[in-house]
Image (cartoon, rainbow, N blue to C red):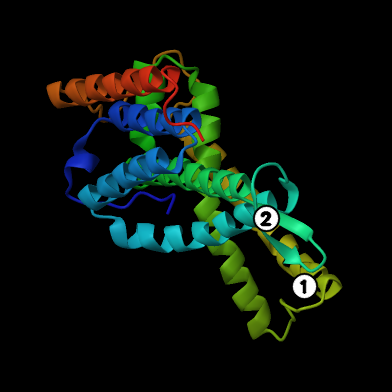
Amino acid sequence: MIEYMPRESPIHRLNPLAKMTWAFAVMILALIFNQIDYLLVILGTVLIVAVLAGIYREMLGVLKGLLMFAVFLVVLQVLFYRQGTVLFFLLPLDYLPVTREALLLGVAMSLRMMTVLLSFVVFLATTQFKDMVVALTDKLKLPYDYVFMFMTALRFVPVFLNEIVKVREAQAARGCQVDGHHPIVKVKAYTQVAVPLVLISLRKAEGLAIAMETRGYGSNQRTYFKEQPITRIDRVVMMAIGLFVVAGVIIRLQGFGMI
């Protein structure tokens, strides 16, 4: 889901800077509120954007995976947060009390985590990496070397995940044990995958270095094959996002949106 998914949607046509502003705005609003009702509204807006972008089916798969981690966060809060009104006990003789505040805090943390991650997943799935680089360097004036390093590392995450699957399948076809239930067996199995993966990584790094040199990386004058201009719609969207963030901060300062 961190790969670009080409679609013909209004979200895809937006400038990367506008989508980046939206993702950071969602993160800010999710962090300043911890009341479940407010977080559900913010999460709902993220899902609406995913529907408008035409990637809602893929988002449902990510959402199912995040729900498992969300349950884990709720369990952690229930086990270690003991303040508040006790609802019931997990064990006899009044051991491991479960408080109302622990449940609310756990659900709020889970919703916050899901909202922030899904917003950036939508941003990455609707924006090409080259457009992100242009927006960060040309519009925000960030150093190109750091932007290129970060975007390259992000871009190669799904590539290496696919390579891990291919190496494991190739090793399994040759009779090697690449999985097991015992932790020691799993460690030994992954050592058989690690060596080919390191060699593949070195080969890809060498190919990337050659491609960068042939394209004049490091020259004084930098040009872009295609630049996506900031249109009037992009400005309106960014202004609306800014107003929503300001309104959210004002609401938070008034004491609303907190457990």
Residue visible at 21% across and 48% down?
A: 52
For discs 1 and 2, the disc positioned in front in the rendered view: 2
99 lies above or below 213? below
| Residue 163, percent from left and from top | 57, 62
Q: Would residue 222 be visible to someone looking at this image? A: no
Q: Is residue 164 left or right of residue 128?
A: right
Label 1 vs 2, first from the N-terminus: 2
Residue 128 on image: x %, y %: 34, 41
Residue at 74% over, 61% down = 195
Please count the marks in the image: 2
Read off the residue under disc 1.
Answer: 189
Q: Quadrant of residue 93?
A: bottom right
| Residue at the limit of the structure toward the right, as seen here | 184
Vertical relation: 107 (above or below) 138: below
Labelled disc at residue 45: none
Q: Which residue is mark 2?
A: 98
Mark 2 lies on a secondary structure that is strand
Question: Does residue 79 sit above or below 179 in this rendering?
Answer: above
Q: Is residue 229 left or right of residue 173?
A: left
Cα separation between marks 1 and 2: 40 Å
Q: Quadrant of the N terminus?
A: bottom left
- Dividing the picture into quadrants, the one containing residue 42 is top left
Question: Element under label 1?
Answer: helix
Q: Residue furthest left?
A: 232
